[in-house]
Amino acid sequence: MPRLSVWAPQAREVTVVLGGPDDGGERAAYPMERGADGVWSRDVEAVEPLDYAFRVDGGEPTPDPRSAWQPHGVHGPSRWVDIESFSWTDTNWAGPQGGSGILGAVHYELHVGTFTPEGTLDAAIDRLGALVELGVDVVALMPVAAFPGRWGWGYDGVFPYAVHDGYGGPAALARFVDACHARGLGVSLDVVYNHLGPVGNYLARFGPYFTDRHHTPWGQAIDLDGPDAAHVRRFVIDSALRWLRDFHLDALRLDAVHEMHDDSERHLLAELSDEVACLATTLGRPLGLVAESDLNDPRMVTSTAEGGLGMTAQWADDVHHALHAALTGESQGYYADFAEVGALAQTLTGVFLHDGRWSTFRGREWGAPVATARIDGRRFLGYLQTHDQVGNRAAGDRIHDGLTPGRQAAGAALYLLWAGTPMIFMGEEWAASTPWQFFTDFDPADPIADAVRDGRRAEFAAHGWDAAHVPDPQDPATRESSVLRWEEREAPCHARMLDFYRALVAIRRAEPDLRDGRLDLVRVRHDDDELVLRRGCIAVVVNLAERSQTVGLEGAEGAGLLLAWHPESTVLEADGVRLGPHGSAVLRMSSTADG
């Protein structure tokens, strides 16, 4: 017999209303019993399907804040789900990389709604073989929590426990994770605990989930440190543990943790880290937490025992920005500091460019240095593209849209063979022709639909874009244009890039020196349009010039050529490597001397 419960500490009465919108007539309502901690509960008869909602103090029936499934949309009743009844086949799953965990693994960021034309988890299963062939270790799913409409990025989710019905609901996520594990792929899930979306957010009807003491770009902050914060903190932590335990996930990526404001004696992230570590011990497999953080603070990935926040890893946007600026020449906005000479070498060896120095974009000193001899470089994810860096451009253009294939290949070689943990954005590996644009599916009658459309255009108009050229997020064509075209991988230009990425990943796996996360052993020389990255006996040599030239590298004549973008014109000379325009090469040197 299912036991339904909800935290509503300020309510005088709470009733549970059973039935869905298709049942017709008056739905059955039953009073719930209040506990000493403000949690109301009641046992109900087990029926299939069990749809329900809560009525607080005689108000409108409202979905369960901990709903597992919203098959009738974000405004409809919740559906009770027994996920334990799923027939799992991954009993012997030890975790990514044979139980080694997510550090150093090749991650692949995937948006369910545009990965396939169907935009479902079940359809995505049919494409997992391509990820295995690429050499992926961890599939990094963008948010699947229930959000308004059929299509969206998922960052405006309003039910942190539910799987979006348009993606197939909770059973589909279980099938997807089980299928990934059967193929040797781990699964990470992007979760958003810094805010809820503007449509379908009913938390305030139940209790003090939000506070005016802190503010975020989305309004009031989640209350993590107020008088009633204990229940709110449990709401967040229980959600995270449920994804890992009940859905067999291997890691969570925590969105914008710098907007999770917490002045408690012990930060929520540290508390979450320790509870996840306990769960990993119970389950007998590694579990990871990956933070998206703008703070440039190495404390983020320092263990809780050492006074840190205990995250397994974090995204390294500075590495992306430096690569982007070096490859594209862009220097506007936050790319300004990264266009400086030496920025790329600094991030590839020290992760953060802003490590206590002045940040032009922020107008203040920012960050702290990474102790490179102590902190494993694999705790930082490096990438050439992400959903943010593509989708938050006005037209959703990918980096290779403005580069020669050789420049993309050079960028790929640098981050895939870097000392960090690499992440590929879906379609990047074959230089997909499709953009990845910002799209929503709000009810056209809801004022939020026009507000999002107008706000998007105004934002980019302020940066010089013609508003008419900014895709309408509400137009179904915007989502459709962002769907990957898998058939184009067979075209020669796309196939060549795909083969190069596969070869890079294979080299990363095969070479012992590339499994070491020691940042203090990374050597980088970056002079104008040439760059050499050395990791032990492996050298990545890059020529960004539009002409052939020799990139200086002592001992190159006796090296072994593992991979080259222009193999027919790559020549190993006594004093360096002769590369074609925008060429790159990976070499195994006879010694580990600096490049």
Image (tube, rainbow, N blue to C red):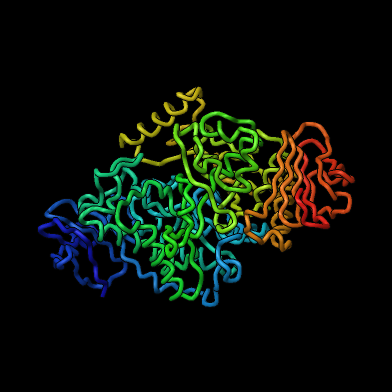
* Residue 277, position as x, y percentages in the image: 44, 68
Q: Residue furthest left?
A: 12
- Location of residue 583 by image quarter: top right
Which residue does the image show at 85% across and 53% down from the upper left?
559
Image position of 586 with respect to 69: above or below: above
Res. 450 visible in picture: yes
Q: Nearer the viewer, residue 576 or 37?
A: 576
Drawn side of residue 332 relative to residue 147, left or right: right
Drawn side of residue 71 relative to residue 248, left or right: left
* Residue 303, position as x, y percentages in the image: 46, 62
Image position of 199 with respect to 314: above or below: above
* Residue 574, position as x, y percentages in the image: 89, 46
Image position of 113 with respect to 324: above or below: below
Q: Quadrant of the N terminus?
A: bottom left
Q: Nearer the viewer, residue 373 or 121?
A: 373
Which residue does the image show at 43% across and 31% down from the upper left?
456
Image position of 442 with respect to 64: above or below: above
Which residue does the image show at 85% across and 49% down from the upper left?
556
- Location of residue 17 by image quarter: bottom left
Drawn side of residue 299 relative to residue 528, left or right: left
Drawn side of residue 456 relative to residue 498, left or right: left
* Residue 545, position as x, y percentages in the image: 76, 33
Label tally: 0
Res. 119 visible in picture: no
